[in-house]
Image (cartoon, rainbow, N blue to C red):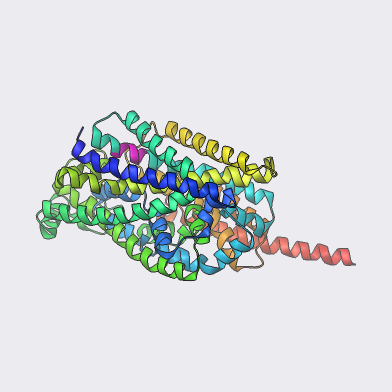
């Protein structure tokens, strides 16, 4: 066990736990436990908002899975990954002030609160909660696996032991601190992620003898590694351009990102977050994926892509610095896991338990149920993560596509199209979820496009057609009743 590497990570975890305990005291003092625990009382400034979006979006896929697949695919995957540059800008510009204002009017604490008030439909609430639970379990499993891979690479422990250590650390922190702890530690984690990316990129270029030397080595091994089309020439222009829908436009439909757009303090905070978030996301995505490609000549022959980043850090950096750098993927994974845990917990507690099981529950009962539900979810994910795939990035992208197919149009058209109604929203959600699962299972990448494209198009058509038809029927029924 390399204590020089592990010591900075332990210090980092202690800082995170200290923030969690301090946040817990603030949560317990909140006028509303729900708003304090799940939304941090809507008091995020611009820098914190930017960093919590970056840290939530930058996950095990960005720091473990992303470099891993870039290692196998080459520079073509870097080009594809850069479609994520617009994520923060696009999300906050589309949702922006209107979403925050409407969410406050509705007293919405979760995305499902917004949908419930907008569409006045129990079916919309149940479909939303089911979608979040189904698809976010996949995403959380990816994060758990990424954290376990990291601990496994650093300590030499068996994967199952590493998984339990990582999972226990995250669960204690999230259960205790809630959303405020998540937002504040995301700020620390976002800074660590930025610094870690910069240090490791410089060290990898140096270890490879400079960029030109690395490119020459890659071209000598396989010319496709430096082409836009991937090592196996499988990244077609149609697929690469359609990938932008998954990790650019469609991110508006991700509940874990959307909830950030209802929790900032004022419009100045939002504008600052757009600028800071775009710069930081762009640098981290470019840096981490370049690191994955540049690692190939420096560290050839790696079999499991998800181990590239930790193994590279320990090879090209002094042990203590490697420990500091490896706090970046730990930060990315923890920040995403805690956000997803809070999201699934809020879907079950706020949107199901308090709406339909016990609407008159007191704060004390809500606290108990919230803590218990979060813990149970965590343990289920541990069981799911015990048999990991070689590349976790596919688990994460499956989750992204599913959530976007379900939520993107009920959210956007719910804000900007007054004719949209509950029937349209229900049709859109069912068509989006059903078509995505069927296409992913039986006909992935239809017409050479990413699997998410067809479900998003179909769910849009479903929303518009069903909303208009049902509205005409209601109008006809109203006229008949008058006669």
Is-magenta flag for residue 147?
Answer: yes
| Position in image of residue 195 (x %, y %) | 26, 56
Which residues fall within the magenta stretch?
A: 145-150
Query: Which one is in front, 294 or 478?
Result: 294
Rendering quarter of residue 11? top left
Rendering quarter of residue 168? top left
19 up-or-down from 165: above or below: below
Total labels: the figure holds 0
Is-magenta flag for residue 233?
Answer: no
Query: Which one is in front, 453 or 202?
Result: 202
| Left or right: where 276 falls relative to 459 | left
| Position in image of residue 373 (x %, y %) | 54, 37
| Left or right: where 380 falls relative to 333 | right
| Left or right: where 265 falls relative to 276 | right
Query: Which one is in front, 30 or 142?
Result: 30
| Position in image of residue 215 (x %, y %) | 14, 57
Residue depicted at x 28% and y 34% = 152
Does residue 439 appear anywhere in the picture? no
Query: Which one is in front, 11 or 301?
Result: 11
Does residue 239 appear anywhere in the picture? yes
Specify the principal SS of the magenta part: helix
Residue depicted at x 18% and y 52% = 294
Which quadrant: the C terminus?
bottom right
Which quadrant: the N terminus?
top left
Residue depicted at x 46% and y 36% = 378
| Position in image of residue 263 (x %, y %) | 51, 59
Seen as rendered, the residue at the extreme right is 483
| Left or right: where 339 falls relative to 476 | left
Rendering quarter of residue 198? bottom left
């Amino acid at each position: 066990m390399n204590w020089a590497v592990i010591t900075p990570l332990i210090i980092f975890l202690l800082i995170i736990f200290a923030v969690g305990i301090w946040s817990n005291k603030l949560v317990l003092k909140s006028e509303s436990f729900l708003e304090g625990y799940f939304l941090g009382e809507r008091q995020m400034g611009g820098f914190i908002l930017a960093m919590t979006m970056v840290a939530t979006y930058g996950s095990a896929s960005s720091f473990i899975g992303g470099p891993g697949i870039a290692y196998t695919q080459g520079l073509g995957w870097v080009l594809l990954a850069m479609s994520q540059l617009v994520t923060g800008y696009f999300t906050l510009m589309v949702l922006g002030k209107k979403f925050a204002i409407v969410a406050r009017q509705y007293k919405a604490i979760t995305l499902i609160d917004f949908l419930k008030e907008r569409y006045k439909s129990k079916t919309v609430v149940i479909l939303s909660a089911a979608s979040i639970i189904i698809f976010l379990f996949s995403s959380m499993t990816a994060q758990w696996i990424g954290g376990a891979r990291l601990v496994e690479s650093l300590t030499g422990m068996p994967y199952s032991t590493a998984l339990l250590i990582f999972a226990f650390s995250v669960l204690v922190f999230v259960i205790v601190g809630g959303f405020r702890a998540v937002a504040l530690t995301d700020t620390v984690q976002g800074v660590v992620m930025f610094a870690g990316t910069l240090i490791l990129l410089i060290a990898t270029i140096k270890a490879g003898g400079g960029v030109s030397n690395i490119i020459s080595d890659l071209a000598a091994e396989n010319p496709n590694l430096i082409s836009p089309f991937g090592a196996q020439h499988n990244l077609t222009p149609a697929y690469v351009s359609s990938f932008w829908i998954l990790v650019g436009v469609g991110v508006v439909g991700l509940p874990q990102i959307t909830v950030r757009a209802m929790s900032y303090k004022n419009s100045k905070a939002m504008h600052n977050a757009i600028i800071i978030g775009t710069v930081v996301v762009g640098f981290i995505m470019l840096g981490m994926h370049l690191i994955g490609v540049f690692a190939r000549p420096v560290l050839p022959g790696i079999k499991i892509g998800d181990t590239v980043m930790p193994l590279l850090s320990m090879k090209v950096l002094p042990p203590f610095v490697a420990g500091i750098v490896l706090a970046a993927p730990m930060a990315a994974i923890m920040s995403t896991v805690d956000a997803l845990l809070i999201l699934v917990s809020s879907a079950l507690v706020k949107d199901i338990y308090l709406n339909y099981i016990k609407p008159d529950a007191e704060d004390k009962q809500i606290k108990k149920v919230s803590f218990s539900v979060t813990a149970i979810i965590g343990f289920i994910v541990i069981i799911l993560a015990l048999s990991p795939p070689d590349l976790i990035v596919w688990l994460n992208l499956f989750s992204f596509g599913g959530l976007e197919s379900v939520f993107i149009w009920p959210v956007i058209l719910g804000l900007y199209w007054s004719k949209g109604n509950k029937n349209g929203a229900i049709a859109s959600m069912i068509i989006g979820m059903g078509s995505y699962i069927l296409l992913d299972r039986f006909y992935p990448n239809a017409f050479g496009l990413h699997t998410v494209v067809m479900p998003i198009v179909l769910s849009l058509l479903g929303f518009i057609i069903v909303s208009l038809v049902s509205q005409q029927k209601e109008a006809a029924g109203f006229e008949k009743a008058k006669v």
